[in-house]
């Protein structure tokens, strides 16, 4: 909207110049001319005001027309590393990463034709220094010098992308560890003690799958082992939601487990999940028991 106003001011200023008359004109025309000059000065002042607003914006603002950059604000200069004079009139594809050029030009053409385009999408740019940055764009159609153009708003999301990729890598690492954790189940439960995530090598040992436990409650999973087992696990979970890290043994009808619980906090610092490692120590207990029996015989 601001850029539309700036362009309107330019056109109105040009019309005001045409309204000037010579000193030989009648008094009324001279008065009109003086009024026109005052209006022109006011228009220039408004134009400068709008440009100052655009240049003070934290978000990069670009105008593209016929595939060329027509306007870039100060934030755009900082983002790309070129001055507005260096950018003006150059193809915007020059600054887009080769791997994303096809996507960007396709969306640009669709927008010009009035076809549906994603409200936001991301792509990479290459700065003057050769640095690759990720940006998120939103755009709309405007008129620039009485011809169709696009008004584009770009935000630098490089750090956000890096954080998301690091998180995804951590999740992949955790999944790999969980799926290969020996003789164990790795479980995440919510405050209702429902299983949100479960993995572990022990599933293959027991001829079962994680899906058999996913989205089920702790009570349902251990219901056949008696109320004392369920109550012990519930009590441990409640203590963990209060911030405690626990480690304890639990015997069920068929197995012996060594269980460790760790509270997991969300971005607000509130504990809303529990990470639990359930290690099957049945075989270890049997071996230990056999050793004790052997020692007693001798």
Image (spheres, helix red, strand yellow):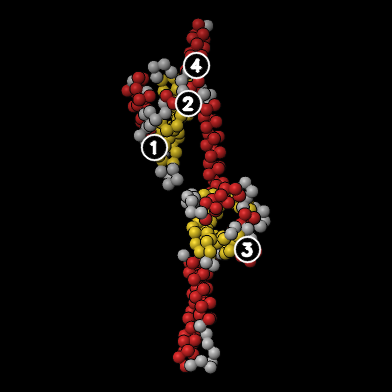
Q: Considering depth in this image, is 158 or 266 the residue closer to the camera?
A: 158
Instruction: List x then y, in percent, for residue 260.
Output: 46, 30
Residue position for label 4: 283
**Callout 1: helix, strand or loop?**
helix
Closer to the eye: label 1 or 2: 2
Label 3 and label 2: CA atoms lie apart by 61 Å
Residue position for label 1: 241
**Callout 2: helix, strand or loop?**
strand
User: Which residue is rendered at x = 67% and y = 53% of the image?
Assistant: 130
Q: Is residue 105 above or below residue 192?
A: below
Q: Is residue 187 left or right of residue 62?
A: left
Q: Which mark is residue 185?
A: 2
Q: Which mark is residue 89?
A: 3
Q: Are marks 1 and 2 in contact (CB under 8 Å)?
A: no
Label 1 and label 4: CA atoms lie apart by 31 Å
User: Which residue is rendered at x = 51% and y = 14% of the image?
Assistant: 287
Closer to the eye: label 4 or 3: 3
Of pointers 4 and 3, the one earlier in the residue sequence: 3
Q: Residues within 10 Å of mark 1 (few under 14, many from 20)?
A: many
Q: Residues within 10 Å of mark 4 (few under 14, many from 20)?
A: few
**Callout 4: helix, strand or loop?**
helix
């Amino acid at each position: 909207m601001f850029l539309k106003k700036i362009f309107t001011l330019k056109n109105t200023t040009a019309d005001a110049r045409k309204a000037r008359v010579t000193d030989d004109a009648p008094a009324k025309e001279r008065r009109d001319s003086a009024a026109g000059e005052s209006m022109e000065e006011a228009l220039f002042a408004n134009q400068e005001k709008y440009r100052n607003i655009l240049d003070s914006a934290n978000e990069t603002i670009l105008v593209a027309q016929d595939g060329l950059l027509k306007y870039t604000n100060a934030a755009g200069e900082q983002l790309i590393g070129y001055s507005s004079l260096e950018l003006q009139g150059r193809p915007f594809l020059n600054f887009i990463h080769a791997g994303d050029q096809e996507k960007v030009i396709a969306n640009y053409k669709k927008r010009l034709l009035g076809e549906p385009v994603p409200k936001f999408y991301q792509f990479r740019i290459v700065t003057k220094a050769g640095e690759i940055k990720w940006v998120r764009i939103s755009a709309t159609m405007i008129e620039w010098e009485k011809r169709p153009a696009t008004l584009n708003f770009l935000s630098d999301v490089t750090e956000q992308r890096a954080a998301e990729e690091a998180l995804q890598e951590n999740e992949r690492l955790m999944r790999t560890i969980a799926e290969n954790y020996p003789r164990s189940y790795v479980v995440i439960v919510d405050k209702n003690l429902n299983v949100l995530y479960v993995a572990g090598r022990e599933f293959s040992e027991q001829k079962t799958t994680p899906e058999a436990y996913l989205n089920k409650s702790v009570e349902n999973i251990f219901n056949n082992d008696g109320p004392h087992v369920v109550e012990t696990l519930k009590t441990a979970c409640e203590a963990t939601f209060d911030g405690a890290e626990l480690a304890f043994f639990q015997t069920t009808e068929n197995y012996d487990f060594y269980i460790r619980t760790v509270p997991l906090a969300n971005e607000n610092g509130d504990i809303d999940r529990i990470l639990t490692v359930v290690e099957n120590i049945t075989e270890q207990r049997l071996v230990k028991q056999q050793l004790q029996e052997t020692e007693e015989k001798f």
